[in-house]
Amino acid sequence: MTRQHRNQVIAAALLTALPALAYATPAAAADSNPYGLGALWSNGDFIARTVLIIMVVMSVGTWYIMITKFLEQARMFKDAKEVKTKFWPAHDIKEGAALLDTASPFRYIADTGIKAAEHHEGTMQESIDLHSWTTMSIQRSVDFIQNRLQGGLAFLGTVGSTSPFVGLFGTVWGIYHALTAIGIAGQASIDKVAGPVGESLIMTAIGLGTAVPAVLGYNMLVRRNKGALDEVRNFAADVQSILMGGYRHETHEPAE
C-alpha cells in the first residue's frame, strides 16, 4: 500500500469517526456535569445536605406507604368478595366465619360478634342487654379496622403539605449562596452563580416531585378507604342482625 493509499484510508476513517465523536462529546460532558445532583451533594454544605436527606426520606416513605396501603386495600376488597361466596352461603355464622381467612378483617368482625353473644351471660356484662353488648363489641372491631386502614395517611398528608416548603427552603439557601458568591467576586459572572442557582432549582424540583405523588396517593387512598369501610360496616350490620335473629340488610332474606 502506497503512502497516498494510506492517507486516503486514514482520512476515510476520520470522517467515519467524526459523527461518533460528535455524539460522544456531549455524553461525556453530561456525565461530568458540575451542576448536577452529584455536585449538589459533594459541594453542598450541611444545611443543603440535610434538606436533601429530609426530602429523600419523605419520598421513600411516601412510596412505601402508598404501595403497602394499596396492597392492603386490594386484600380487603378480595376478602369482601370471599364473604359473598363463602360466608353467606354457609348454614350458620360459625361455619361461615371458619371458611374465611384468619387474617381477614371480616373474619375478625364475625368472631368478635360470636364471642360477644356467647359470653354475655353469667358475667357483669349481663347488666348490659345482649343487643347493646354485641353492638358495642362489633363497633369496636370496626373502629379498629378503620384505624388500621387510616394508618400512614397522616404522613402522606404531612409530606404533601410540607415538602414544597422544604424544597423552597433549599431554593432560598441556594440563592443566598449565589448572592454571597457575587458579593465576594464583585461581579455577577455566570461561573459564580451557576452552581448555587442550579442547587436551588434542583431543591425546588425535588420538593415538587415529592409533594405531587404524596397528594395524589393520599386522595386515592382516602377514596378507596371509603369503599372498603362501606363493605366492612355493611358486613358488621348484617352480622349484628343475624346474631339477634334478624335478616341481612342487603337481601332481607331470613337468616339460616
Image: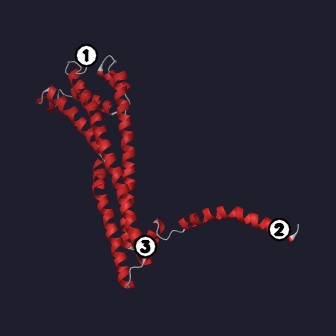
What residue would you read off at disc 1? 255
| Callout 3 amino acid | Gly
- The earlier-in-sequence mark between 3 and 1 is 3
Residue drawn at x 32%, y 30% is 107
Distance CA(mark 3)–CA(mark 2): 48 Å
Question: For residue 165, what is the image quadrant?
Answer: bottom left
Q: Reply above or below: 127 against 13.
A: above
- The earlier-in-sequence mark between 3 and 2 is 2
What residue would you read off at disc 3? 195
Pointer 3 local density, CA inside 10 Å: few below 14, some 14–19, many at least 20: many
| Callout 2 amino acid | Arg
Q: Reply above or below: 26 against 159.
A: below
What residue would you read off at disc 2? 6
Distance CA(mark 2)–CA(mark 1): 98 Å
- Along the line of sight, the residue nearer the viewer: 189 or 66: 189
Determine if residue 44 is in view. no
Distance CA(mark 3)–CA(mark 1): 73 Å
Q: Quadrant of the C terminus?
A: top left
Dot 1: element: loop
Determine if residue 39 is in view. yes
